[in-house]
């Protein structure tokens, strides 16, 4: 396991010890990370990864923690947040963004540069790294439609560039997960558009989102994947589960696909409620729901 002294000489690296991850997750649940690291340069990330590898310390990379339930026992080893690696560069029709840049901000940069094609993502609260990992999507758009290439680091610290066709994108899935890669940055290609029209479309989608989703509460977005031929929210509604609560976590009354942390709930509440919803929906409709949210860490 990595020691404090292994890390103190790495420049551009902020470290917190035994840091509660509930301070960072959208659900507001999650126990402590042994070590929470914020590299501000790729060199710092590389050095940290090398030290972790040399000491057999497990490494977990998080983005904006908007699609996660971190269990109450927290995460052992090093948890890396890439929020300081957030540069966004525009060149012609191309935008290159580092993994820690917020997806929402990148869509705003696209609008400000009269670039269309990224409007679908304007309300998704993830980072670029998390969005690529998940192949995030909304309102008919998905990351795979705009991504040209992705710079990644493997566990040995090797950096390479994957083309879109090498990303093996699927529904909320990419090769990043299968190969345990770290997304460093991603390049997107958009088209010339009218900034007013782009803004109007983003406003329309954000209005839709606000009217349908319980954005006033902590949550992790849609908890379940869309089952083939069905909508998870509808199946949950039909099973009369809206408002069902375990501890402080409840199936949203506004959008049945969301579970909201209404009263200081914890990850155990989330996991129990997920299991209950899977069981009841199966009983009611015969369909087995599969979580979209990633559940990580120790009980
Ligand atoms: C209110 C709300 C609305 C949402 N709406 C949508 C929606 O419309 N569409 C949609 O697709 N999703 C939606 N989500 C879910 C979530 O925002 C997306 O899945 C988003 O892409 C996750 O990005 P993140 O940075 O938060 O990733 P995290 O939640 O931090 O991580 C998700 C996974 O990605 C991995 N990861 C993150 N960064 C990296 C990296 N740099 N390298 C390697 N692995 C990495 C993590 O290890 C983890 O396994 C919503 C969530 C909320 C709370």
Image: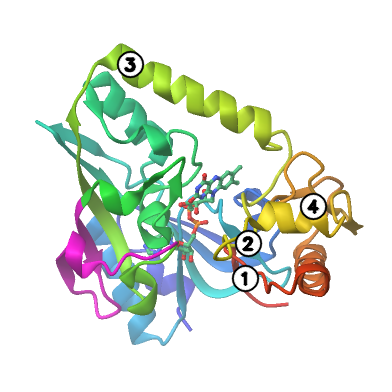
Q: Disc 4, disc 1: CB below 8 Å?
A: no
For marks 2 and 3, give the CA distance: 32 Å
The label on residue 197 is 3
Name the spot of residue 92 as percent of width and height, x first: 9, 31
Q: Residues within 10 Å of mark 1 (few under 14, many from 20)?
A: some
For marks 4 and 1, give the CA distance: 16 Å
Disc 2: which residue: 224
Is tag 2's residue or tag 1's residue first in the polypeptide sequence? 2
Element under disc 1: loop
Q: Disc 2, disc 4: CB below 8 Å?
A: no
Disc 4: which residue: 237
Q: Disc 3, disc 1: CB below 8 Å?
A: no
Is tag 2's residue or tag 3's residue first in the polypeptide sequence? 3
Q: Residues within 10 Å of mark 4 (few under 14, many from 20)?
A: some
Q: Name the mark nearer the viewer: 4 or 3.
A: 4
Q: Disc 2, disc 1: CB below 8 Å?
A: yes
For marks 2 and 1, give the CA distance: 6 Å
Is tag 3's residue or tag 1's residue first in the polypeptide sequence? 3
Q: Name the mark nearer the viewer: 4 or 1.
A: 4
Res 295 → quadrant: bottom right
Q: Is residue 170 magenta?
A: yes
User: Does residue 99 appear in the picture of this structure?
Assistant: no
- Magenta range is 148-171
Position of 293 compared to 55: left or right? Answer: right
Residue shown at the point (39%, 61%) measured from the top left: 133
Element under disc 3: helix
Residue shown at the point (56%, 56%) measured from the top left: 67
Element under disc 2: loop
């Amino acid at each position: 396991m990595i020691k404090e002294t292994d890390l103190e000489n790495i420049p551009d690296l902020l470290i917190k010890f035994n840091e509660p991850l509930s301070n960072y997750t959208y659900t507001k649940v999650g126990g402590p990370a042994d070590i929470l690291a914020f590299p501000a340069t790729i060199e710092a990330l590389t050095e940290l990864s090398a030290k972790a590898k040399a000491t057999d310390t497990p490494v977990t990379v998080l983005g904006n923690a908007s699609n996660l339930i971190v269990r109450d026992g927290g995460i052992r080893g090093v948890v890396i947040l890439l929020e300081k690696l957030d540069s966004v560069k525009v060149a012609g029709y191309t935008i290159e963004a580092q993994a820690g840049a917020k997806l929402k901000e990148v869509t705003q940069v696209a609008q400000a540069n009269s670039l269309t094609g990224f409007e679908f993502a304007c309300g998704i609260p993830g980072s670029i790294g998390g969005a690529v990992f998940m192949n995030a999507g909304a309102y008919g758009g998905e990351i795979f439609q705009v991504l040209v290439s992705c710079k990644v680091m493997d566990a040995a610290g090797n950096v390479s560039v994957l083309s879109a066709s090498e990303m093996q994108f699927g529904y909320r899935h990419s090769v990043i997960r299968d190969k345990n890669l770290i997304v460093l940055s991603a390049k997107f290609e958009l088209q010339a558009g009218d900034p007013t029209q782009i803004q109007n479309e983003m406003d329309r989608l954000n209005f839709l989102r606000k009217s349908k989703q319980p954005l006033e509460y902590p949550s992790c977005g849609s908890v379940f994947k869309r089952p083939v031929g069905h909508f998870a929210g509808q199946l949950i509604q039909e099973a009369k589960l809206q408002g069902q609560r375990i501890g402080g976590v409840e199936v949203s009354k506004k959008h049945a696909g969301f579970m909201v942390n209404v009263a200081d709930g914890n990850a155990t509440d989330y996991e129990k409620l997920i299991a209950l919803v899977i069981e009841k929906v199966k009983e009611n409709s015969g369909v087995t729901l599969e979580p979209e949210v990633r559940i990580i860490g120790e009980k």
